[in-house]
Image (cartoon, grey):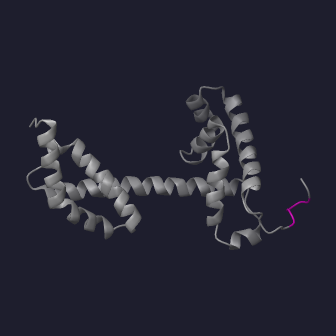
Amino acid sequence: MHHHSLERSRAYEAFVRANGDAVLRFLRRRADPQTADDVFSETMLVVWRRFDEVPDDALPWLYVTARNCLRNAERSARRQQRVIDRIITVDPPSETALDATADPREDCLRAALARLSKTDAEVLRLWAWEELGPQEIATVIEASVNAATIRLHRAKKKLRQEMEAVCPPLPAAPLEGGAR
């Protein structure tokens, strides 16, 4: 079906008016309000892109689409959480710091990552989010394995320095094995 853009826009708007609330309710039962709203927008974007494929019995199709969008959102949120966990475990904070939830570190981690060069940040993300080793990172950033290994090592060190600079100081605890 080829509508011209105006007709297509009108048909789409009418469609969203008719079905939007049901989709939003579906998402709100499955996610927090903020995520539900984000995923709703994402779902409606998919509907707009694939409007010609929407079957007459639209709701089941819409629910499947919404569920897929929600899954993708949850996956990326989990991936971000993994990154934070992995980066924090590279250099675990002292025991006393671990009792407090690791969450305030999340903001300072983001701030610290933002202060790194694009390549350093990318290397850390590949290592932590995508869980690649130096060999694979080398391929992605088009460097030798040796260069990638050094890069990763330096990026971790820089990230730690930036985190010390931007993060609230952790309660001091004696380092294991004396001074470094």
Return the residue found at the far right: 178
Chain part drawn in magenta? 174-178
Q: Quadrant of residue 17?
A: bottom left
Q: Nearer the viewer, residue 172 or 162?
A: 162
Q: Position of residue 57 (x, y in %)?
A: 9, 56
Q: Position of residue 100 (x, y in %)?
A: 68, 72
Q: Position of residue 140 (x, y in %)?
A: 56, 31
Asked if the stretch drawn in magenta spans residue 92, the answer is no
Using the rendered image of the protein, determine whether residue 162 is visible from the camera's viewpoint: yes
Q: Residue at x 24, y 42 (%)?
A: 49
- 109 relative to 31, above or below: above
Q: Tell me the quarter of the image containing the N terminus.
A: top left
Q: Residue at x 12, y 48 (%)?
A: 11
Q: Nearer the viewer, residue 31 or 130?
A: 31
Please state if 124 lies on the left or on the right of 22 as rendered: right
Magenta span dominant secondary structure: loop
Please state if 7 lies on the left or on the right of 82 as rendered: left
Q: Quadrant of residue 8?
A: top left
Please state if 159 lies on the left or on the right of 15 as rendered: right
Return the residue found at the far front: 6
- 112 relative to 175, above or below: above
Using the rendered image of the protein, determine whether residue 133 is visible from the camera's viewpoint: no
